């Protein structure tokens, strides 16, 4: 009888141990399942505003299909020119959400999707500005600035940074602006234009004084609280509207939830504060 009792005790202990291991394994699996990573490919001009939106999203909101805190969600952002990010996505880069600085690249992705329900959405409208850290602009208007660019004092040594028009939508709009003023070909021929890979680099060239002027995003001006004499905000009607579209690449709950927040009144408030125009 004693042997039977010992055997039963051993079996009960083994059963309990097995149950505990099973429970621990299920708990670990559940924890792993709850943890998510959201990978965002974002246009370079968003580097000043997107971090604030992400912080607000993680602090104030919860994943739509979970009650877990946003600390269980990692958000990894890659900033680059819209064209470069588009090429990466086409090559199979594992992004969940693409936030472009134009409408063309997201539409190209949508056109290649078999699932036609995946369509781009407009999340912001950018503004173009001319910025200088070395040449005061407070006495200039856009009209008088054009006169300055064609004056005798504007020599071959004067440099203007512009983002690559082929890859960066802000660069394309800056090029269109200069073309409308019949200046682009002249400045290009004189080698006054310094082409940057993206709008972030164009801003850095101007901000460090490597060039005299830079066509940049108004949001970059707002981010550094630039002095009034350091920039001119160009009239929105003087260049093609910079409508910035995004597109969902994966159907992760976190991707959809973050996209909804980005387009919400709360998310849009950050864009307005950062120097973007209202999305109609």
Image: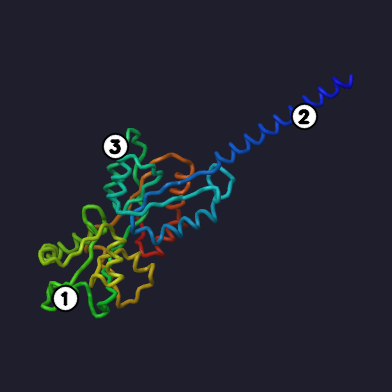
Q: Which residue is identified by label 2?
A: 13
* Quadrant of image for the C terminus: bottom left
Outermost residue, right direction? Answer: 1
Residue drawn at x 59%, y 41% is: 31
- Name the spot of residue 272 as percent of width and height, x first: 40, 62
- Name the spot of residue 154 as percent of width and height, x first: 14, 75
Q: Which residue is identified by label 1?
A: 148
Residue drawn at x 34%, y 76% is: 227
Q: Earlier in the sequence, mark 2 or mark 1?
A: 2
User: On the image, which quarter does residue 149 sit in?
Assistant: bottom left
Instruction: Say few, some or many: other residues with alpha carbon within 10 Å of mark 3 (under 14 / 14 to 19 / 20 or more).
Output: few
Residue drawn at x 38%, y 52% is: 78
Say left or right for 126 vs 186: right
User: On the image, which quarter does residue 197 sit in?
Assistant: bottom left
User: On the image, which quarter does residue 43 sit in?
Assistant: bottom left
Q: Earlier in the sequence, mark 3 or mark 2?
A: 2
Q: Earlier in the sequence, mark 3 or mark 1?
A: 3
Q: Which residue is identified by label 3?
A: 112
Mark 3 and mark 2: Cα distance apart in space: 59 Å
- Disc 2 versus disc 1: nearer the observer: 2
Mark 2 and mark 1: Cα distance apart in space: 88 Å
- Mark yes or no: residue 241 visible: no
């Amino acid at each position: 009888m004693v042997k039977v009792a010992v055997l039963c005790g051993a079996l009960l202990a083994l059963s309990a141990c097995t149950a505990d291991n099973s429970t621990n394994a299920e708990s670990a699996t559940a924890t792993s399942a709850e943890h998510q990573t959201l990978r965002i490919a974002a246009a370079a001009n968003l580097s000043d505003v997107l971090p604030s939106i992400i912080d607000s999203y993680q602090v104030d909101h919860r994943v739509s299909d979970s009650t877990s805190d946003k600390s269980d969600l990692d958000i990894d952002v890659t900033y680059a020119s819209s064209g470069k990010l588009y090429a990466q996505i086409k090559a199979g880069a594992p992004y969940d959400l693409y936030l472009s600085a134009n409408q063309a690249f997201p539409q190209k992705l949508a056109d290649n999707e078999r699932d036609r329900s995946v369509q781009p959405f407009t999340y912001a409208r950018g503004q173009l500005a001319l910025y200088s850290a070395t040449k005061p602009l407070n006495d200039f208007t856009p009209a008088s600035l054009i006169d300055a660019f064609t004056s005798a004092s504007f020599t071959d040594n004067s440099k203007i940074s512009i983002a690559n028009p082929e890859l960066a939508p802000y660069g394309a709009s800056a090029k269109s602006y200069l073309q409308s003023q019949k200046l682009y070909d002249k400045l290009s021929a004189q080698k006054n234009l310094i082409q940057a890979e993206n709008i972030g680099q164009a801003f850095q060239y101007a901000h460090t004084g490597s060039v005299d002027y830079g066509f940049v995003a108004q949001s970059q001006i707002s981010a550094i609280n630039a002095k009034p004499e350091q920039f001119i905000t160009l009239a929105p009607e003087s260049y093609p509207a910079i409508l910035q579209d995004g597109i969902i690449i994966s159907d992760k709950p976190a991707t959809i939830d973050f996209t909804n927040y980005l387009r919400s009144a709360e998310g849009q408030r950050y864009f307005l504060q950062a120097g973007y125009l209202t999305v109609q």
